[in-house]
Amino acid sequence: MAFKKALFALGFTLPSVFGLVPPQKRATCSDGVNSAKNAVCCNLFQAREDLLDNLFENECGDAAHGALRLIFHDAIGIDPTVGGGGADGSIATFNATELTFPANAGIDDVLDVMGPFLLKWSHVLSAGDFIQFAGALSLSLCPGAPQVQFAMGRPSPAAASPPDLVPNPFDTVDAILARFGSVGFSPEEVIALLSSHSIAGADDVDPSIPGTPFDISPSTFDTQIFIDVQLRGTIFSGTGGNQGEVESSVQGTLRLQSDHSLARDTRTACIWQSFANNQQKMASEFGAAVFKLSLLGQNAAALTDCSDLIPAAPAFTGTASFPPALTHSDVEQACASAAFPNLPTQPGPPLVVPPIPQADDS
C-alpha cells in the first residue's frame, strides 16, 4: 500500500477526554443537506456514507470487525519508556514494519480491505483519524453497541510503533494488566475494552478455521462473550493445541487463553462477571474506554469533536442467556464475592456456530 509519508513527530501523552475543541454554533454544510456541530466535520459526510455502504456494506460483518480490531492494534502502540505514537495511524503508514510484529498477525488482511478507502479519503482524514473514524462507524452497524465518540485532527505518524507493545492472546494476566496500566488503564477498563470480543473472531490463532468467532453471536454487541468464556471448556473447534487458545464450550467458537485467564483471575474475575447480564454497563464502559484508547498519544485539546457524525447502533433486544444445552452448572465460578447470575438457557439442540464470512479483499 502506498501510504503517504509521515511528517510530524508525536510525544507521549495520556488523553484528557475533556480537552476537545468545543463546538461552536451548529454549521450548515456546503451540500445544503447536512449540518454538524463543528464546521470542519462537514468534510466527513461523504466519507461516512462511502465507508458504511461500500466498506462495511451496512452490516456488522468481517470488515466491521476488522476496523474495530485496528483501533486497538494502532492505539496501544505507545509506552512511556520506549515511546510510540499511540492512536496515530502508524500501523497503516508503517505497515511494512508493524505487520512483522507477531501480535499483529491478520492485520494485513484488515489493511488490504481498508487501505484503498484510507487512501481515497486521505485529503480529509489523516491515517490516525481514518482508523478511529472507521472503527467508530463500524460499531454503529452492530446491534447493542454504544455510540462512540470520535475526534479528528491527529497529525501524521512520525515512525512505526516499537515492537512488543500489542498484547498476545497467550500473555499472562500480569503482563496484560501491566501493559494497559502503563498507559493509564485500570483492570475494569481492560475488561470493558474486551467487550469488543463480542463482535470478533480469530483467523490466525488456529489457521485451519479462519473467521472463528469468540462467542455465539458475533454480529451482535452483547454480553454473550462474558457468559460463554465463563463456561467450562470441553472442545476445540479446530485442530487444538494452538498457542493462545484453550478449550471452548460451544462448537464453532474459539476461546482465547487471555480471555479465559482474565475471567478467572482474582483481580478481574468479579469485573468480568459483572458484565455477564448487564448490557447497559457493558456498552457504557466500553464506549468510554475505547474513546480513551483513541486519544492515546494525542493532544486532546487540538482535536475537534465530530461525534455527531457517528450514527446510533440498532438497539439490542435480546436477553442474557446460556447457549443451548448449557446451564448454570457449566459455569466455572471464579468471582469469590458473588455468584454467577442465574440465566435462562436458549432452546434447541447444542449449537454449531458458523464462521464469520470473510470480507472480499479482491
Image: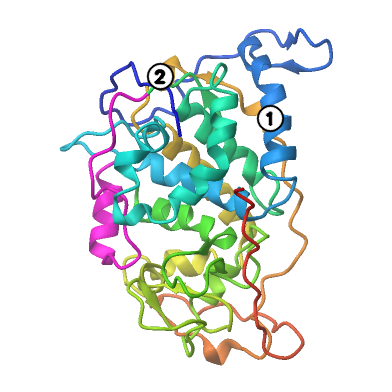
Q: Where's residue 62, x and y in %? A: 61, 55
Residue 259: assigned label: none
Q: Where's residue 297, x and y in %? A: 33, 29
**Residue identifier under label 1:** 48
Residue 182 among magenta residues: yes
Q: Where's residue 317, x and y in %? A: 78, 61
Going from the N terminus, do you reach mark 1 or mark 2 first?
A: 1
Amino acid carrying label 1: it is Arg
Which residue is at 46% across, 66% downward? Answer: 272
Which residue is at 23% across, 46% downward? Answer: 163
Tag 1 secondary structure = helix
Residue 345 among magenta residues: no
Tag 2 secondary structure = loop
Asked if residue 52 is positioned above or below residue 178 in the image, the reply reads above
C-alpha gap between disc 1 and disc 2? 20 Å
Asked if residue 287 is positioned above or below residue 212 in the image, the reply reads above
Residue placed furthest toward the left: 81
Q: Main secondary structure of the magenta part?
A: loop
What is the magenta range?
157-184
Foreground of the two, 361 or 17: 361
Which residue is at 39% across, 29% downward? Answer: 88
Using residue 145 as the reference point, say whether residue 68 is left or right of it: left
**Residue identifier under label 2:** 155
Amino acid carrying label 2: it is Pro
Q: Where's residue 27, x and y in %? A: 72, 9
Q: Image quarter for residue 305?
A: top right
Which residue is at 35% across, 71% downward? Answer: 244
Q: Are marks 1 and 2 in contact (CB under 8 Å)?
A: no
Q: Does residue 341 appear in the picture of this structure?
A: yes
Q: Does residue 184 appear in the picture of this structure?
A: no
Count of numbered labels shown in the rendering: 2
Using residue 108 as the reference point, say whether residue 14 is left or right of it: left
